[in-house]
Amino acid sequence: MKFRKAFTMLELIFVIVVMGIIGKFGVEFLAQAYQNFIFSSINNTLQSNSATTVEFISSRLQHRIKDSIIVRDTSAANSFIPLASATSATANTYNALEWVGSDIDGFRGNSDAVANLPNWSGIIDLDVSTNSTLVSTATDTGKVDTLIDVLSYGDSNFNSSAALYFIGSSSDVINGYGWSGAITDQNQTMHPVIIDITSVDSYNSNIGNFNEVYEYYKLAWTAYALVHDTATNELWFHYDYQPWNGDKWNDGSTKKELLMENVDTFQFMAIGSIVKIQVCVNTSVVEDYSLCKEKTIY
């Protein structure tokens, strides 16, 4: 008679116990590894998106006209105050940041055969300028007009959009930039201008004579607004509008782009002329997880 070897009862029990242990802890290990992978992927995505958003905001705020920046409460008839007046206790009540930006794209200039020259120089020749016509040395208003047309996709131009801010002049943040309505006289901070058709380096006033002219200036053609929609947790970027002409951030013609979704916090404050911003984003995939990015803009 031949006998075949098989598992003994003890061996079978041992195998069953080992398999049970492997089954219990192996599944938990795999589940934990999968959760860690999901969390790492979400964290990396939030890190990347929030960093990109903060850097984009910083690049725009860096070239702001510093005296022009305000904060709004869009749910309260668009009430606004200067950012410098917002305390740490009241800043949370405002969900929009708005400012006038200088035309940094035009100031960077373009390549030509001689040098990389700016389209506008930022200098007024006070010796040859008059009350109604300002001569800006080494400025090409035609190129500025072309650039504004390109950046606004044909919706804006020099004569209808451009304005000057004189560095050193008196600044009225409430009325001088058009936040309270269109500028109708020259005694304001921003000076709407048109091209002098007789010369490519001159500006004419849209509202009469220039007032309080200084040697150095910044040229602007649009304001910018960052608006946190607390109902949808979306952060929107608005541009291509001119407050000095009576335009508003929420006009139908104002362009806007969605910067980020799932934004649960958008905060800002001023320390002198320095602006600090914070953007916090969350995800519905991982419960109670939020990631924040901060930036200080000088």
Image (spheres, rainbow, N blue to C red):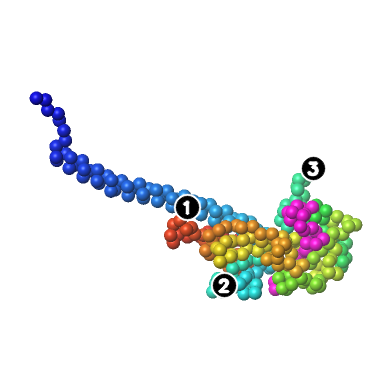
Q: Is residue 267 visible?
A: no
Residue 194 seen in render: yes
Residue 42, which numbered label?
1
Q: For residue 93, which numbered disc appears in the image?
A: 2
Q: Is residue 222 magenta?
A: no
Callout 2: helix, strand or loop? helix
Q: Give the mark, 2 or 1, whose residue is nearer the N terminus.
A: 1
| Residue span colored magenta | 146-174
Amino acid tagged 2: Thr
Secondary structure of residue under mark 1: helix
Horizontal arrangement in the rendering, residue 297 relative to residue 185 (left or right): left
- Disc 3 on helix, strand or loop? loop
Whichever of labels 3 and 2 marks the residue nearer the N terminus, that label is 2
The Cα atoms of the two marked residues, 3 and 2, are separated by 52 Å
Query: For residue 74, which quarter of the picture?
Result: bottom right
Marks 1, 3: nearer the viewer = 1
User: Residue 104, position in %: x, y?
Assistant: 71, 56
User: Within the image, what quadrant is residue 158 found in?
Assistant: bottom right
Label 3 sits on residue: 113
